[in-house]
Amino acid sequence: MPDIYSGTGDGKVQSLISPTWAGARDATAGASALDSASSDGNFVAVQRFGSRGGGNTYRVHRSFLTFDVSGITSTVADVELKIYGYSGNDGTIWGVKGLNFIGSLSIFQFDDIAGYSVGNTMVGNVTQYTEINTGGGNWSTSGYNSLSGTSDLKDDIQSENSITIVMTDYLYDARNITPTSNGTFNCGGYYADNTGTSKDPYLSIKIAGYGHKINTVAAANINKVNTIESANIGKINTVD
């Protein structure tokens, strides 16, 4: 079961603070791109602020994770996205297919989501890559959170050289629903720029194939048996 860590080009793009929800959520460029932070309490977030002169202002935060999956060519049986939580856990979160970028993250990646269109919900229009964490304290801020991958993510891991997963708030951002109360609705997390890999985002991938121990060695640690790749093994000595 290979683990593939996000590249150090990962990071967050946050919108300008806007007097309208549409101005923040549907901006074509963010106010800033942060691709060297080790962690952020607003890994994904939606914010509504009260204005001194009356009315409200809004801001949206989205994170971008990149993975080199060029080494995976066999059928992916299962995949989970692992994100080590940090600080905030008052929001909801999911992962969707992003447009791949080369080099540093920029403010112009803010809406680089495959299938995204201004003014419309993401649900049913973009490619969902992970399950939805519905919040309510379900997001750990002191350990890894696991988000199961969809069939689209499995297929793209097998067929593409690299993938980008865009993490967004689900309740408001994905569904294009204006927050009705002031606050910061967020899920915090670590990036690959954190020292070492003990808290880095990664994909835990299970390749289809033989799934049992051989001579006490776990299947996840077996690449080949007698020169045959494990993904191509259905039986050994007629045993499934």
Image (cartoon, rainbow, N blue to C red):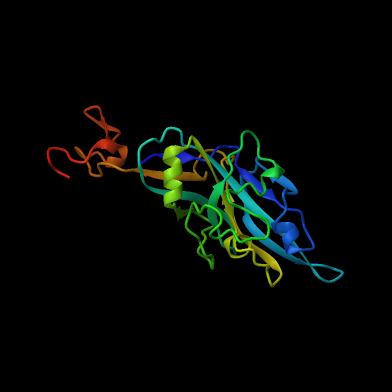
Taking the image as shown, residue 33 lies to the left or right of residue 66, namely: right
Residue at image location 68% in from the left, 60% down from the top = 119
Q: In which quarter of the image is residue 90?
A: bottom right
Q: Which residue lies furthest to the left in this view?
A: 238
Residue at image location 14% in from the left, 43% down from the top = 239
Q: Residue furthest right?
A: 53
* Count of numbered circles on the image: 0
Tell me if residue 185 comes above or below residue 71 in the rendering: below
Whole-percent x and y of residue 125?
A: 56, 56
Residue closest to the eye, 118 or 228: 118
Whole-percent x and y of residue 85?
A: 54, 54
Q: Quadrant of the C terminus?
A: top left
Taking the image as shown, residue 29 lies to the left or right of residue 135, namely: right
Residue at image location 58% in from the left, 51% down from the top = 115
Whole-percent x and y of residue 159?
A: 44, 38
Q: In which quarter of the image is the N terminus?
A: top left
Residue closest to the eye, 222 or 114: 114
Tell me if residue 104 comes above or below residue 54 in the rendering: above
Q: Quadrant of residue 50?
A: bottom right
Residue at image location 72% in from the left, 53% down from the top = 27
